[in-house]
Image (cartoon, rainbow, N blue to C red):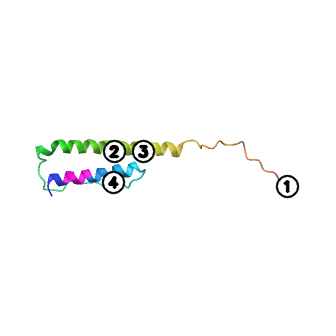
C-alpha cells in the first residue's frame, strides 16, 4: 500500500463519518493505523495529509459538541411543568 492509498482511505472514512453525523447517527469510529513499511510521507502529499488532519480534528470537535448537547438534553429539567404534590382521594370513607 502506498501513501496515496492510505490518504484515500482516511478520506473515505472521514466522509462516511461526516454523512453519519449529518443524519444524527454514527457508529464508533475504529482506530486507523497507518500500515507499517510505508516510509516517510512524500513531500508532494504533505499538504493533503495536513488537510486530512485538519478535517479529522474538526470531526472530533463536532463529535464532542454533539456529546455535550446530548448530555445537556438528558440532564435538563423536564419540559413538562411539574404540578403540585400528588393528591389522593379515599372513596371508601
Q: Secondary structure at mark 1?
A: loop
Q: Residue at x 85, y 55 (%)?
A: 91
Question: Which is in the foreground here, disc 4 or disc 1?
Answer: 4
Q: Mark 1 highlights which residue? A: 91
Gap between marks 4 and 2, in whole Å?
A: 10 Å
Q: Secondary structure at mark 4?
A: loop
Q: Earlier in the sequence, mark 3 or mark 4?
A: 4
Q: Secondary structure at mark 3?
A: helix
Q: Residue at x 44, y 42 (%)?
A: 68
Q: Mark 4 highlights which residue? A: 29
Residue 33 appears in view: no
Q: Mark 2 highlights which residue? A: 60
Could you tell me residue 73's position as x and y percent? 51, 44
Q: Residues within 10 Å of mark 4 (few under 14, many from 20)?
A: few
Q: Earlier in the sequence, mark 4 or mark 1?
A: 4
Task: Give whichever of 89, 6 is nearer the camera.
Answer: 6
Question: Which is in the foreground here, disc 3 or disc 1?
Answer: 3
The answer to whether the residue labelled 4 contacts the one labelled 2, judged by CB atoms less than 8 Å apart, is no
Q: Is residue 83 magenta?
A: no
Q: Earlier in the sequence, mark 4 or mark 2?
A: 4
Position of residue 16 in the picture relative to residue 7 (left or right): right
Q: Return the mark for residue 66.
A: 3
**First to last magenta residue range:** 6-11
Question: Which is in the foreground here, disc 2 or disc 1?
Answer: 2
Amino acid at each position: 500500500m502506498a501513501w496515496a492509498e492510505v490518504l484515500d482511505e482516511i478520506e473515505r472514512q472521514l466522509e462516511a463519518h461526516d454523512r453519519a453525523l449529518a443524519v444524527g447517527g454514527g457508529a464508533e469510529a475504529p482506530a486507523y493505523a497507518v500500515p507499517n513499511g510505508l516510509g516517510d510521507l512524500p513531500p508532494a502529499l504533505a499538504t493533503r495529509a495536513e488537510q486530512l488532519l485538519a478535517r479529522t480534528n474538526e470531526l472530533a470537535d463536532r463529535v464532542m459538541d454533539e456529546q455535550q448537547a446530548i448530555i445537556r438534553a438528558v440532564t435538563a429539567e423536564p419540559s413538562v411543568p411539574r404540578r403540585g404534590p400528588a393528591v389522593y382521594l379515599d372513596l371508601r370513607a
